[in-house]
Image: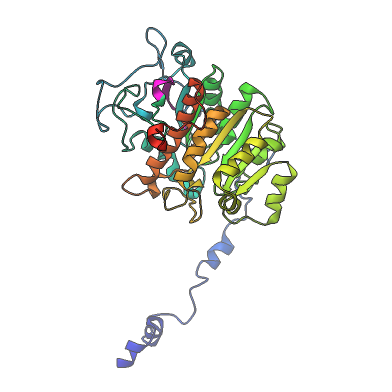
Amino acid sequence: MKIFGFLPIASVLLALGAMPETGSAQMLKDIVDAAPKEDPAPMPHINQDDPSKMNIKQDKSTNIWRDLREGTGSRGEAGPIDVQRYQLQMEPVGIQTFFKLPVALRPEDLVAGEVDVAIFGAPTGALPHSAGNMWAPAEIRTTRDYGGYGDPKFPLSWVEYETLLAPFTVLNAVDYGDAGLNAYNQAHTLEEIRRMTREIASVGTIPFIVGGDHSVPNGTYRGIVDVYGRNKVAFVHFDVHLDRGQGKFGAYYHSGSFMTMAVEEGLVDGSNVIQYGMATPVFGEGDWDQVLSEGGKVYHIHEIRRDGVVETFNKIYEDLKDIDLVYVSFDIDTFDMSYAPGTGSSSPIGSHPEDLFPMLRQFAATKTIVGVDFVEFNPFYDNKGQQTARLVRRTMFQFLTGIAMKKAGMEPDYIHPRISGKP
C-alpha cells in the first residue's frame, strides 16, 4: 500500500476498483445528443427586423436616472445658493462642494448670479480599467488640500501661489452638481453630459467638467459645438496617450474615439486640433500619419524636453493664431505616474506639474476658454494621501486662475514680484 502514496489519486481509485476504466470527459455527451435541436433564442437587445440595431427596453425605469425630481431648484429668486454655514471653516466642516463653492442647478441660476464658471461632475466609467472613475467627482469634492477654508471669496481661501491671485474674488463660480449616470448605457449617459454642457454654455458660462473616463468629450465637446458652431472652437488635448481611433469592438464611444469622430463629422477642423504630452506606444506609424493628414499637431514628450515647455507652448500659440475659442480636454495621466498614480493607464514617462502649471495658467489667460474637462482620475488607484485627487484640483485651479487673470485684464505671464524675486 505504500506505493499508493506516490501514485495519482485516479490511479489509486482504479487499482481499488472504485472508478470505472472509461473516462468521464464526455459524461454528458449522451444527454446532449438526446436534447431537442432548436434555433437559439435571440438576445433581447437585438432588433429582429434589423440585427445591426439595438433595442432599448422602454418602461418606467428607462429614463428615471435623468428625470428631474419634482421641485428641483425651485425656491424664491433665482441664483446660486451658498450651502455653507460659517464664514471660516476647516476642510472637514460643511457640505462638500467643488472648492466649497455655492450650488446652482438651473440655467436661470447661472444668469441671475452672472456665473463665469460652472463645475459639474460627469461620473462615467466605460472601460474595464476605468470603473472607479465614476467616483472621481465625489472624491474631488472631498479632497484634503490646503486652501479650502470656507467662503471662496474670503482672503484666506484659495490663493494661487505664483500670482498671489485669489481667482474666486474675480470669478463667480458654482458647483452645478453632476450629470446623470446610466451605468448600463454609456451612450445615454453621454447624451445627458452633452445636454448639461450645452445648458451651461448657452448662457455664456464656462463649463468645467470633472470626469469620468476619457469618453466624456464625446458629450462635452458636442455640447460646446451645439452652442458655438462647427469649426469655431479649437480642441487642445493634454494626454500621455494619443487617444485616436474609432470603433473598438464596434463601439462608438470610448476613450480613443472622441477626437477622430469630431474631425470626421466636421465638428472641428483637423488643423485646430493640438495634442500635447504623448509618450506611450501606439499601433504603428499610421496613427501619427492620420493626425498629420488632417492638419493636426502632436507634441511628444521627446520634443517637449528637447525644445522646452515654453518653446512648445509658443508653437501652440502659433498653431492657433487664427482661432481664439478653445476647448481643453485634460487627462490626468498627462503627468508622470510618480505624480499621478491614481489613474487606470498611468505612464512612467510624462509631464511634471512644476513645468506645466505656469503654462496652463498662461494659456487660459491668453486664449478664450469655452470649456475644460478633467478626466481619467480613478480614486480606487490613488494612495491614502489623495495625491492624484489633489493634483487634479490644483490643475483645475491653474485654469481657473488663468481665466480670472483674463477677466481682470492681467498680463498672461504675470508673476507676483514677491514670488519672482523682483523688487
Q: As drawn, which residue projects farthest toward the right?
A: 293
Relative height, residue 66 to residue 143 (above, below): above
Residue shown at 41%/31% (left/top)?
Answer: 416
Name the quadrant containing residue 18: bottom left
- In this rendering, the answer to whether 366 lies above or below 52 is above
Q: Is residue 350 left or right of residue 54?
A: left
Q: Position of residue 421 (x, y in %)?
A: 40, 37
* Quadrant occupied by the N terminus: bottom left
**Relative depth, front residue between 18 and 168:** 168
Instruction: Tell me which residue sits at (64%, 50%) in the image.
Output: 39
Give the residues drawn in magenta, as a range: 168-181
Where residue 292 appears, as percent x and y from the top left, is 72, 46
Query: Is 410 left or right of 15, judged from the image as shown?
Result: right
Q: Quadrant of the C terminus?
A: top left
Q: Position of residue 226 (x, y in %)?
A: 63, 24
Residue 182: x, y in percent?
A: 48, 34
Of residues 240 and 307, the one nearer the viewer is 307
Q: Is residue 347 magenta?
A: no
Residue 393 shows in this picture: no
Task: Between residue 258 and residue 291, name the one nearer to us.
Answer: 291
Q: How are the residues colored?
A: rainbow
Q: Is residue 15 above or below residue 302?
A: below
Task: Residue at 36%, 86% (x, y): give it.
Answer: 16
The answer to whether 127 appears left or right of 273 in the picture is left
Depth order, front residue of 390/161:
161
Q: Which residue is drawn at the image coordinates 59% and 64% (left, top)?
A: 33
**Does the image show residue 358?**
yes
